[in-house]
């Protein structure tokens, strides 16, 4: 059974505009499999259950909507952090702007290089978590990515990385359409912090597959750039082994269209997965967090903390699910999605879901939408803090629970400062 | 210092007159207490003076050192030297107590055209003042009032007062929710701040707070008006006989 005719036509049109990367390498088979998945599912359409709140058309159409690059002389985020920089310009690896791909305990390679080799560890991973993540909810844009991604980085972590790895995405061309696919394998007991920043392209489709072995940990902090016109559909697929840790935080300020999906499978006991996000939107802004966490092991903890600040007609979407499989006892699942609406024109659409098949679990979810607390605002003003800064302080207070999910205090402070300056700039 | 003349206030949203002509003059260095039954308008008076939304002034004036308070934003009143210690201090998660206080101190300094206080100087001063109020370093770091006990919240209000050094302090039922020890601690904090240039308006239901913070003048408020003014003895009289006699006398 395939997709309806209308969807098929749209999907075929999109596929026709793309080329499968050439070469008789191992990736070709995986790409063809992904293409088959995509053809069967068809690209997302408005009537699909998980696209009810977000119009997929600009993400699926053949050509991206042109987007001007945002120019700023502000110091790039993470500049003060010790890290290995890997730069992509409109979705293409830029060796000159990047650091040497060397880091103790870590192997860093370009996707297009490793697909040329006969035998490589990434062969077992590329597209594999994405493919598993297609059920029970389809994610066609991720299958499209696996099929057509022409660049990306593959990272194997065997020890405790002494520095973070920073993927930096520059957007320069007004019509760039970037498709990047990264694969990360964190071996037993190993640790990595992955940073990502920048808008990447006029339209960006990115998949990040992360396989975290037993006792390993993966920390992820990203900012999605300040471009107003850019569009992005990103997916994180993570699999967690026993006693492993996954923590991911995303800051999104501006962006006419963002869909961030995160699909996590806890497969080993005592594992720990936290996903958080802080989104700031002013005006023509649509931001969608779609999260699916599956508990398939005993005594695991998952947290979803998503906060959005919306003004001047901005829209926020949250679709978050916790699935606790039969036997996943002692699961501790927590989910909160909140929006702070700074005016009456903005809106927040939330769909929290719990599906539980084990009987000894603790799961909670909450979703709220509200304005600045007038009592708190008066309290601050009565102490002499003017209305503008007082509103900012309360906005940062609202975002704090999400920012607190960043373990590293230096990174948390960096993100806090960016949030604060975004608010400051918008104060009239 | 504070001069209130024939102040009339109604709720903005409904046609309900709360203050029906309040007259009150507090001189520099004086401590005045306002007592009165529930619903007499005591808290409304404190909110209207500090600039809370939701009230409409329908007549009268209120000035601090000759400046019209009623025309100013709350932050302007604060910078001028007005401080309200809240009956229910607000919890602000995610904002450290110290950050909040430094922001407030510097905002007021900026409004008055003064230089901002340095981080080091601020730390020195706040540690000193916190110590006398038995507020430890941990409490200074915690988010504003989050998880604080009733007593801790009130002590935190007094700490803010000590840091902001206002000239006109209004204490709105600061004794509510306090046990005897906490009341003593809070009162000691207030008494330490008494000075020639600083005046207090203490709003309370009960006389016991006035055992600790000794007022110069006591006012009885009922039904939106001050119906009687006297010395500290007036508070004792109320404690013994309740408000009924006074209300009857006035009616």
Image (tube, coloured by chain):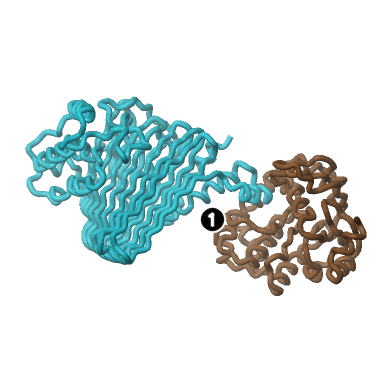
Chain colours: A cyan, B brown
How busy is the neighbourhood of tag 1: few (under 14 within 10 Å), some, or many (20 plus)?
many
- The local secondary structure at tag 1 comes to strand
Image quarter where the C terminus of chain A lies is top right
Residue at 17% from the left image edge and 48% from the top image edge? A128
Residue B93 location (% of width, % of height) = 54, 55
Compared with residue A22, is residue A237 higher up or lower down, i.e. above or below? Answer: below
Viewer-closest of A398 and A87: A398
Q: Is A381 positioned to the left or the right of A160 in the image?
A: right
Compared with residue A38, is residue A331 higher up or lower down, i.e. above or below? Answer: below
Question: Is residue A327 visible in the rendered structure shown here?
Answer: yes
Instruction: Quadrant for residue B128, please give it.
Output: bottom right
Residue B129 location (% of width, % of height) = 67, 64
Question: Is residue A95 visible in the rendered structure shown here?
Answer: no
Residue A340 location (% of width, % of height) = 51, 44
Image quarter where the N terminus of chain A lies is top left
Viewer-closest of A366 and B168: A366
Q: Chain of mark 1?
A: B
Viewer-closest of A396 and B52: B52
Q: Is A109 positioned to the left or the right of A362 in the image?
A: left
Instruction: Quadrant for residue B191, please give it.
Output: bottom right
Residue A383 location (% of width, % of height) = 67, 51
- Image label count: 1
Instruction: Quadrant for residue B127, please give it.
Output: bottom right
Q: Is B94 positioned to the left or the right of B172 in the image?
A: left
Which residue in the protein does label 1 denote? B93
């Amino acid at each position: 059974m395939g997709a309806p005719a209308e969807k098929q036509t749209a999907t075929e049109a999109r596929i026709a505009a793309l080329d499968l990367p050439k070469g008789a390498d191992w990736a070709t088979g995986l790409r063809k499999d992904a293409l088959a998945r995509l053809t069967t599912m068809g690209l997302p359409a408005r009537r699909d259950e998980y696209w009810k709140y977000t119009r997929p058309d600009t993400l699926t159409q053949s050509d991206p909507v042109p987007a001007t690059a945002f120019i700023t002389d502000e110091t790039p985020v993470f500049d003060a952090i010790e890290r290995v920089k890997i730069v992509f310009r409109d979705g293409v690896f830029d060796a000159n702007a990047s650091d040497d791909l060397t880091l103790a305990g870590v192997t860093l390679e370009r996707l297009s290089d490793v697909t040329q080799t006969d035998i490589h560890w990434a062969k077992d991973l590329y597209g594999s978590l994405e493919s598993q993540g297609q059920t029970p909810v389809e994610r066609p844009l991720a299958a499209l990515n696996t099929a057509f991604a022409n660049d990306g980085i593959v990272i194997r972590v065997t020890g405790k990385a002494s520095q973070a790895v920073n993927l930096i995405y520059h957007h320069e061309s007004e019509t760039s359409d970037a498709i990047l696919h990264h694969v990360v394998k964190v071996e037993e007991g190993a640790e990595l912090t992955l940073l990502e920043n920048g808008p990447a392209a006029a339209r960006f489709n990115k998949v990040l597959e992360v396989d975290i072995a037993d006792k390993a940990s993966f920390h992820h902090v990203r900012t999605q750039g300040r471009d107003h016109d850019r569009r992005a559909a990103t997916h994180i697929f993570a699999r967690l082994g026993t006693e492993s840790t996954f923590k991911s935080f995303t800051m999104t300020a501006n962006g006419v269209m963002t869909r961030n999906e995160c699909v996590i499978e806890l497969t080993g006991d005592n594992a720990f997965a936290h996903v958080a996000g802080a989104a700031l939107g002013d005006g023509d802004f649509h931001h969608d967090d779609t999260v699916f966490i599956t508990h398939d092991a005993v005594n695991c903890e998952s947290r979803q903390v998503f906060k959005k600040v919306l003004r001047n007609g901005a829209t926020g979407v949250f679709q978050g699910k916790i699935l606790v499989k039969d036997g996943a006892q002692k699961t501790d699942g927590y989910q909160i999605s909140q929006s702070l609406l700074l005016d009456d024109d903005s809106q927040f659409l939330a769909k929290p879901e719990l599906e539980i098949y084990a009987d000894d679990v603790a799961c909670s979810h909450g979703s709220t939408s509200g304005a600045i607390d007038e009592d708190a605002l008066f309290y601050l003003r009565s102490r002499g803090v003017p209305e503008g800064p007082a509103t900012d302080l309360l906005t940062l207070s609202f975002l704090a629970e999400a920012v607190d999910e960043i373990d590293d205090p230096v990174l948390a402070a960096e993100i806090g400062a960016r949030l604060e300056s975004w608010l400051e700039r918008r104060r009239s | 210092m504070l001069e209130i003349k024939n102040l009339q206030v109604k709720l903005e949203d409904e046609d309900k007159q709360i203050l029906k002509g309040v007259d009150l003059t507090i001189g520099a260095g004086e401590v005045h207490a306002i007592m009165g039954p529930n619903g007499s308008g005591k808290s409304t008076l404190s909110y209207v003076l500090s600039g809370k939304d939701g009230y409409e002034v329908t007549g009268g004036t209120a000035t601090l050192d000759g400046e019209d308070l009623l025309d100013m934003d709350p932050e302007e009143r604060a910078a001028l030297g007005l401080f309200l210690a809240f009956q229910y201090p607000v919890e602000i998660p995610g904002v450290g107590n110290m950050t909040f206080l430094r922001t407030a101190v510097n905002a007021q300094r900026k409004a008055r055209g003064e230089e901002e206080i340095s981080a080091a100087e601020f730390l020195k001063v706040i540690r000193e003042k916190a110590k006398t109020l038995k507020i430890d370093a941990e409490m200074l770091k915690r988010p504003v009032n989050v998880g604080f006990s009733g007593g801790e919240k009130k002590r935190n209000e007094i700490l803010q007062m000590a840091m902001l050094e206002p000239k006109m302090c209004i204490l709105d039922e600061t004794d509510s929710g306090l046990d005897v020890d906490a009341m003593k601690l809070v009162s000691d904090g207030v008494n330490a701040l008494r000075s020639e240039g600083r005046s207090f308006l203490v709003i309370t239901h009960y006389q016991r707070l006035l055992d600790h913070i000794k007022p110069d003048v006591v006012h009885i408020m009922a039904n939106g008006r001050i119906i009687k003014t006297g010395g500290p003895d007036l508070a004792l009289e109320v404690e013994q006989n309740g408000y009924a006699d006074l209300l009857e006398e006035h009616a």
